[in-house]
Image (cartoon, rainbow, N blue to C red):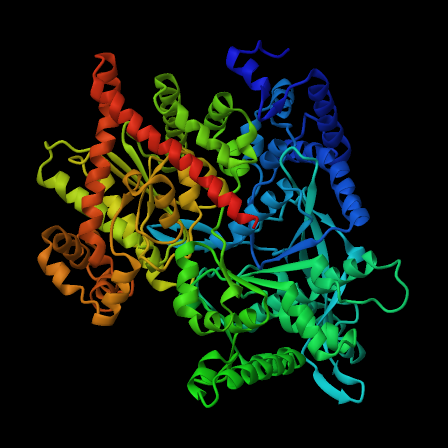
Amino acid sequence: MAAPLTDLEKRKQISIRGIVGVENVAELKKGFNRHLHFTLVKDRNVATPRDYYFALAHTVRDHLVGRWIRTQQFYYETDPKRVYYLSLEFYMGRTLQNTMINLGLQNACDEAIYQLGLDMEDLEEMEEDAGLGNGGLGRLAACFLDSMATLGLAAYGYGIRYEYGIFNQKIKEGWQVEEADDWLRHGNPWEKARPEYMLPVHFYGRVEESKEGARWVDTQVVLAMPYDTPIPGYMNNTVNTMRLWSARAPNDFNLKDFNVGDYIQAVLDRNLAENISRVLYPNDNFFEGKALRLKQEYFVVAATLQDIIRRFKISKKGSTGPVSFDSFPEKVAIQLNDTHPAMAIPELMRVFVDVEKLDWDTAWAITKRTFAYTNHTVLPEALERWPVGLLETLLPRHLQIIYRINQGHLDGIRALFPGDLERIRRMSLIEEDGGKRVNMAHLCIVGSHAVNGVAEIHSNIIKNDVFREFSELEPDKFQNKTNGITPRRWLLLCNPGLAELIAEAIGEEYVKDLSQLQKLNELVNDDAFIRDVSNVKQDNKVKFSQYLEKEYKVNINLSSMFDVHVKRIHEYKRQLLNCLHIITMYNRIKKNPKAPFVPRTVIIGGKAAPGYHMAKKIIKLITAVGHVVNKDPVVGSKLKVIYLENYRVSLAEKVIPATDLSEQISTAGTEASGTGNMKFMLNGALTIGTMDGANVEMAEEVGEENMFIFGMRVEDVAEMDVQGYDAVPYYNSIPELKQAVDQIQGGFFSPKQPELFKDVTNMLFNHDRFKVFADYEGYIKCQEKVSQLYQVIIIIPHLFSTGHSTANVCLRRLHGCVLDVIHLSAMGVAEIVK
């Protein structure tokens, strides 16, 4: 018998999380028990919590299937233009709760599971994250799929079904240790294998020239097996498809070895082919020119383009004679998510010219009109440059095609700039310095009709600096598309309290149209609403602190500011600057323990690429500083430092709603956009940051006075690069900086190994490309402003009880800012679909 509903629960029954109807609940319970029995072959006596999760997942999936089939039928019948999003990464996270929300089943499922005597949160925690991405690039791809489905666009995500996703991070004695992410070991209830659409992908071989044209022969074949995952739109009956390819060896793989009798070895060698989809490369903003990575990049585009062309030809099946590709760009849009799928450009040319027998100029015109390219980074070490020798071995026909594309490209430049050999060298697709390499960004620019950066400042840097000569040649090709986030996962799912509060105040339309959040500005003087927003934040902090206390055995001061810095560990993201601030706060407390101090819980998390020595040292330093701070009785509850282990999508969903202060402190001009900054703002955190990436547009939207902006601007950084950056004068002239650096250098945080962090301080003094010391003073002063404002919030409850007028003013200013920043995300999601 279900417990009687509270008033809040009655309100929630008709909420953005779906209607609870008796029929719905009964049907869900019936489906759950059916799947437990027939799919999992268990009864309640022997079923495990994972069995219950799978039974619920299959039940929810049943509600997707009809919509999924009908959506694909509708696309077949109406033949709309289709969007194909090609990405080597899709950082999806968990699927169950997102699906329940988008189908309007959340509350009915909650009630059904409650009536079955189970706990919904326990079941949700059983799901493995689909960690098929490193960070922002992969998570952006996942948000795009949700947004496109919600808009009803005929969109498909294409990528690789990695057997092992981004590694699981363990922190052992303060060091990052990587463990394999065997996310498929229990099975994946959300995917459907499609062996009937298995396709061949060719590697190696040689090119034969004949009267009919070039033929790529004597190749090794690997099969690409598609696995489809449904992508439901929000409450619109649209279910799109993400198709991920898995590598399979053909049955005749290494047949010659069978014939000489080494049958066992031939079967074992099948792994060589299947290794292509074995593991995600764990590098973010770093290019590692390994043959296996190039195989992955070609594998996904070769399989995907065959699929796209098959679908295009089916839509033309009524026409007589050979299929005309003239309308291909009117029916097919392919977006390249960074340069990783760049081999799609020569591959489509190969198919058009060698297989479909189009002439070169026609094929090239169609190809350029089909592709668009998103650039994600300006860091030189991240730009892909493949050695010509590797391409010649692995993809000989594609190298020929790239050379011919380059020839046509350079002929055009020669005609415009006769005799300008330096310009030709700089703009060539082939770099000659230090060994011949193919510049994949140049290939993408030349082979696409549109090129975009992911924030206004980033797009300007691309146009005016990194690819200046290309943009001068074709200025209309270069655009900006500021990144966005999906509010379904990053508000409704992770922060239901705030989502419900907003829905009660302004209605539910904002879930699909975040510009509606501007209506919240009318509530900036509504004391009851402001109090409710504050209460939601405090509830989220209580919940997250319980998680931290359970996982890290540390007592959290609930009145402390939750100061959060979560993202990949990289020098440009400047976790070291945050670390210096922690040490400075620690030193101030130690110097004067009785002085007033606004308490902070500093939470830092993120993964370092396994081969990135400096990033791993930074993690060790943060954990070493945390060890000293957290154990010091003088500090007590004033300051705590927590390193969040194994930061991932499902952990972001826990920490973001509880955050007071979001750290976005990269060196100006280095962070392409950032999307974490938007997620924190949408959940009512304030931002401390530099004028970098999307922070710039956030500041424009909400007013710089409503963010904590500090540090050098892009122009200042450029000027310093010209003059030469010298860290020593900052060290000598700022006593607190000197003290902190001396402590790191002298072994204060590593007494058993005093030399442990010497390479960190050596980098800071001698080759710090990201100028940490130059922004230290501005950062510390800005953090003091943060503390002053937070102190006002802490004393407000007391002031309210005495009717103090200052309290009302301060609270309205703070929450007016929060309402503004919540509305900011409207910009992000609007941009995501342009």
Rendering quarter of residue 378? bottom left
Task: Name the spot of residue 739 as percent of width and height, x first.
Answer: 12, 53
Confirm whether residue 402 shows in the render.
yes
Q: Residue furthest top?
A: 4
Going by the image, does 276 lie left or right of 761? Answer: right
Res 311 → quadrant: bottom right
User: As displayed, is residue 403 above or below residue 575?
Assistant: below
Look at the image and tell me whether residue 753 can be seen: no
Vertical placement of residue 677 versus 574, above or below: above
Quadrant (top left/top right/bottom left/bottom right) for the N terminus: top right
**Along the line of sight, the residue nearer the viewer: 263 or 97:** 97
Q: Nearer the viewer, residue 162 or 479?
A: 479
Residue 742 place in picture, x, y as percent: 14, 57
- Position of residue 329 measured from the top left corner of the image (x, y, whole percent): 69, 62
Mark count: 0
Q: Nearer the viewer, residue 289 or 104?
A: 104
Q: Residue 23: where, in percent of width, then height?
A: 73, 18
Instruction: Report whether 121 appears left or right of 404.
Output: left
Q: Nearer the viewer, residue 164 or 824?
A: 824
Instruction: Look at 20% across and 65% down and name the residue there.
Output: 765
Looking at this view, name the residue that lies furthest to the right: 320
